[in-house]
Image (spheres, grey):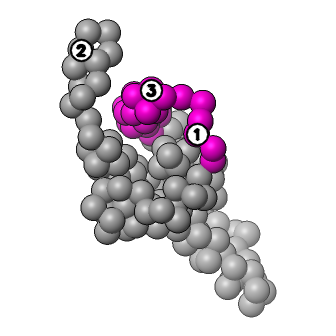
Amino acid sequence: MYSIASLTILAPPQVVEGLVVLTTLWCCQYVISRVRAIAPIAEAESGAVRTRPTTFIGKAVTPIHGLASYIPSITYVLCVTGNLFTQPAWMQRMSLPNDYFQYETKVVLRIAACALSFVLFRFVGRAYMHIGNQWSAIGVHIIFIICVFRISSG
């Protein structure tokens, strides 16, 4: 139980990890749905992408690159969910040092990051609609990696 500004928050570690997992899943779903909505509009406005890779290596690397952008998020969701909503020991060992804040402060920061991610992704979705035919899938992958990886890393 935590008290912040005279408000009591009941948040065992599993609840916070569950919130982060749900936020990560929502972000994945939101990005995929936005890509599905924006890609046809961009293609209709500017035509098909003309710079697709033509070499064997280019054709092999492009889908791998796209899939690799989802690996950190998928790994986090599967490992934390499979470990009963606690980060596995190997994941905790690989995280950045976190001696700067007390546990309660970390909980508040993670909850705030989850809440802010909803606002951020709505803004990003509107930005993609605004750029129209200048849209590129690589931009989606880069922003997705940055946002989701920062949220999920403890």
Dividing the picture into quadrants, the one containing residue 64 is bottom right
In front here: 40 or 122? 122
Badge 1 crowding class, 10 Å Cα cut-off, few under 14, some 14 to 19, many 20 or more, is few
CA separation, marks 3 and 2? 14 Å
Q: What stretch is highlighted in magenta?
A: 96-123
The rendered magenta stretch, by its main secondary structure, is classed as helix
Q: Position of residue 112 (x, y in %)?
A: 41, 29
Q: What residue type is labelled 1?
A: Asn
CA separation, marks 2 and 1? 25 Å
Dividing the picture into quadrants, the one containing residue 59 is bottom right
Q: Which amino acid does label 2 sit on?
A: Leu
Q: Is residue 111 above or below residue 69?
A: above
Q: Let me know if residue 129 appears in the view.
A: no
Q: What residue type is labelled 3?
A: Thr
In the picture as drawn, the residue positioned furthest to the top comes out as 6
Q: Where is residue 52 in the image (x, y as percent from the top left)?
A: 70, 74
